[in-house]
Structure formats: structure tokens, C-alpha cells
Amino acid sequence: MRTPEELAACVDVALRRRPADLVVRGARLFDLATGELTLADLAVCGERIAAVGEGYEGLATVDARGLTAVPGFTDAHCHMESSLVTPYEWERMSLPHGVTSAVCDPHELANVRGTEALAWFRRCAEGMLLRLQVQASSCVPALPSEQAGAVLDAQALAPLASDASLAEFMNVPGVLGKDPDVLNKLAAFSGRPVDGHAPLVSGDALNALCAVGVANDHECSSVLEALEKLRRGMTVFLRCGSVGRNLADLAPLLTLTLCDRLCLCTDDRDPLDIREEGHIDFAIRQAIALGSDPLAVYRSAALSPARHFGWRDRGLLAPGFVADLVLLSDLAECRVERVFCRGREVGEAAFAARPPMPDVAPFLGTVRCRELTAADFAPPESNRAIGVREGSLLTEDLPAEGDDLACAALIARHGPPERIGRAWVRGFGLRQGALASTVGHDSHNLCVVGADPESMAAAANALRMYGGGFAVAVDGRVTSRLPLPLGGLMSDRPVEEVAEALAGLRVAARATGTILQNPFLSLAFLPLPVIPNARLTLDGFTHV
């Protein structure tokens, strides 16, 4: 809420009665409303743009000649926990790439600690520089059959309905079956955007999802699937995550006709990929390189998500809008030179001025399972195997045969009852050793894939000891690990340390023979029962 004093100050700056707090001088402005490129100054008053024009005076001035100014980018759907760092470190990593707003579903940590996780994320958002919209996690656990660390029913979520939107609704069977708790959740959040999660949902089932208020989807895998959802009124999110990447497949849709119904998102993106490739800026580069109109791409990165989520003060460089802006040295390459968030330049000084991050103690010690032995990793009884593919969250139901066959196990880690599910898996390319993770979407039980039971037990027990994370073992001995003690999902260390540790972990993983670029994220999605076709659950191999 803006105060009368703030409004009066903006009037005075716009009418040149007083100097602006900041003037960004001489930039080439990319107007996402008209598509024009014009030379102008931006006069900033507090957190807002007060004027666009020429000759404005400011208490501080930034020389932006030779640079192009665009509105700050929005990550329209993300799980910050999947970047393996806290929200404060996620911001340090993402803001320099131009991400000044994000819509976050904290259902990873919520699956471990329930409403306590949602409250913690909301407290983090209060201290962050970027606009972080924290959603109410709709499906904890993802399906009633899952064994997570918490259950968020309609009664638990109802207090959030006044100021939060409902995060991705994965329980499609619950909608189609008119489950009372499912309908109560949707009714409580009616009138707000309800995020979707509807891979391959079509026809009458898609009509039903849209009829109950599901407003968007980030799981489209083809242009035809996306077009059907667009025709039914959905907004489609083009994803550029570390494993799930549909942007290249859907890039033909990024036109001036459709871009107001398209948004860019990362969903799940690890710090190494952000460091080496980028964030939303990487998605922009990729889309333009694939032939999409730059105006359509930048609208999908900034203006479209603002409109979709009802933010009337973001997405344009215009008077009254929040002064979130990115200065680029190359528009087509989206080369970010400087970033301003709420009128302040992004840098270590701005990050250091944030209040202390909320206490993380409630999220320690969440891996609660017994010590495991090689006997716990007996060969699965099923004659079917889960087929994983590079760059896709979709899996295949395959025969359990061939050289590329490994054993996978899922261990309940949130406490009793004790359960272990086993299945064969193909696509990892393991020749020796094992990989283990407590990041196992979405219930986040302990998941292991390996070539021998001794290595599987060693990797799993290492995570039990360190409170969660990733581990590699060969010949029954741990060769590399990345502790993630916060909920078994996030590190309490700076993002730079996490990225370096992750790089070392990938090197160690390659020694097992894996052919996957990011085997730990593939491992993390192996137990996700809301994406077709074959999954590992606590009941073993499951066809979904």
C-alpha cells in the first residue's frame, strides 16, 4: 500500500519540482506495451518509476548510454528448495540474472514440515529484495497414497486463502473423483489463480480441471498439448529447468498473438546450471535463438506473468510501476550488465542490508529411518523397469532387461511406518556404485539407484548420518557427498560453496558410468507419482 506522502513525492519528481532519488540516463528503453525502442531517462522516486522522459535531475545518476533497459523478469513457477539453497541465497544467485519477481511453491519443504515450512518461506519473503509470492502448497502429500512428513488438508490451508494463491494442483484424480477435501481447497481459493500440474491431461478431463479454476500449466510436452490448454483458457508456462525443459518444444508458440498467455519459468533449477547457463535470461536467449520474436519473449518474461498473477505495478518501464529494471548490453543475447530492484542497484551491499534470515532450526534432523544394510536392497521382483530420459520428467514402462539395468529403492525417511519400495530402472547407465538422494519429489523420501547393494547401503547411510542430501558410493564406500541438512533439501551454506560441491559430486557420479548430465535431478523425479508413466513408490514399481 502506497502512502499519500509517497504519491506526493512521485508527483513532485514527475513535475520536476524536486530531484529524483535515481535517474537512469540515456538508456534505450524496450517498451513492452508498444514494441518501440526509444532513448529516454527513467526518474525513480523511492521504489517507483516517477517519470520517463529527458533531462530529469537525480540525487544519484546511472549512465546507461549504450545499454537497453527492460523490465525485471519473473520466474512464474519455481521451487526454491530444488536449487538446494535457502531463499536468501536463491535471491543472491538469481537477482543478478535479472529475476526481480518469483512465484514460489514451497511444497518440497512443506512435504517435510507442513505449515511450518509455509510460514518460514513467508517470513523469508518479508526480508528479501525481490518480490516473492509464496503460494499455499495444495498437494501435501502429492497423492493420498504417498507417505510424506506432513499432511496439508483444506482446513490447514484455509487461513492462507485471504492473501495467497493456490500452488500447483497435482491431484488430478482427486478433482475428477470429486474428493471432498480437494473440492474444499479449490473452493477456498476460488477467485485467485490456481496453478496447474496436468501432464498429458486432455479432453473431458481437461475441461473438468479448467471448470474448477485451474488457471495454468507448466507440464506441456508438445505444441498440440499446449494449444489445447490455451484453447481452454489456460496460461501455459514454458519451462527451462535443470531436468524438465519444454521451452524448445513449445517455442513455436512464442508469437505476438499468443505471448500474453505464455510465461517463462524454471520450476526446478540447480545452482550449477544457473551459474553456468543463467536463469530466466537463459530461457530468453534460448527462445530468441530458436527464432521467436524478441518482443514476444520479453513480454513472456515480464509483462505476461504480471498480468496473470494480477500485479498491476510490474512488467513495464512506465510511471507508477515498481522500478525493477535490467540493463542489457545485447537484447537478443540478453546479456545482463546491471540490475535494479525496487529502485536499488543489486549488489552485495543491498544483500547485506537485508534482515537476518529466519531461524532454520525446525528443519534440522528430518531424516528419520534406521541404518540400512545390503540386505535391504535385494533385487526387485517386478519384470518391468522405469525408463528415464535426459531432459524429460516423463518416464517409460519398459521390460526389465538389457545392459543398462540398475536397482532402485525408496526408503520412508519421515518416521514410522517403515517401508521400502524397490524397482528396476533403465537410462542411468550405471556400471558400478550407487547414487542416493533425500530430494525425491514430492514426498522426499530417501531414493537410491545402484549397481550393487553394498554401495546402495553405504550411500543411503551417509545421508542418514548427514541429515540428507546427495551421495555417491563405489565398492561400498562413499566417494562424494553434498549434505543438505535443512529438511534434507537445502544447504545452510553460501550458494558458491553449494555450486562447487555439486560440481564435484557430478564428477564423482560420472565414475559410476552414468550417462545422464544431471543424474541427481533425474533421481529426484524417479518417485514422483503424478507424472506418467512408470514410477518408484514405497510400494515398488508403479504404473501411473
Image (spheres, helix red, strand yellow):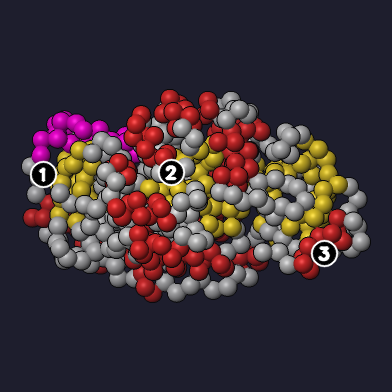
Residue 491 point in image, percent of width and height:
41, 63
| First to last magenta residue range | 382-403
Question: Where residue 321 sits in the image (x, y, percent)?
Answer: 71, 52
Q: Specify the quadrant of the image occupied by residue 296.
A: top right
Secondary element at tag 3:
helix
Q: Which residue is mark 2?
A: 214
Badge 3 or badge 1: first in the primary sequence: 3
Q: Nearer the viewer, residue 319 or 186?
A: 186
Q: Residue at x 15, y 31 (%)?
A: 399
Q: Above or below — where is 59 with respect to 530? A: below
Instruction: Name the mark nearer the viewer: 1 or 2.
Output: 2
Q: Position of residue 127 (x, y in %)?
A: 57, 68
Q: Mark 2 Cα within 10 Å, few/some/many (few <14, many 20+)?
A: many
Q: Residues within 10 Å of mark 3 (few under 14, many from 20)?
A: few
Circle 3 residue: 8
Classify 10 Å Cα crowding around label 1: few (below 14), some (14-19), many (20 and above). Answer: some
> Looking at the image, which residue is at 25% across and 33% down?
396
Which numbered mark, 3 or 1, is in the foreground of this view? 3
- Give the quadrant of the N terminus: bottom right
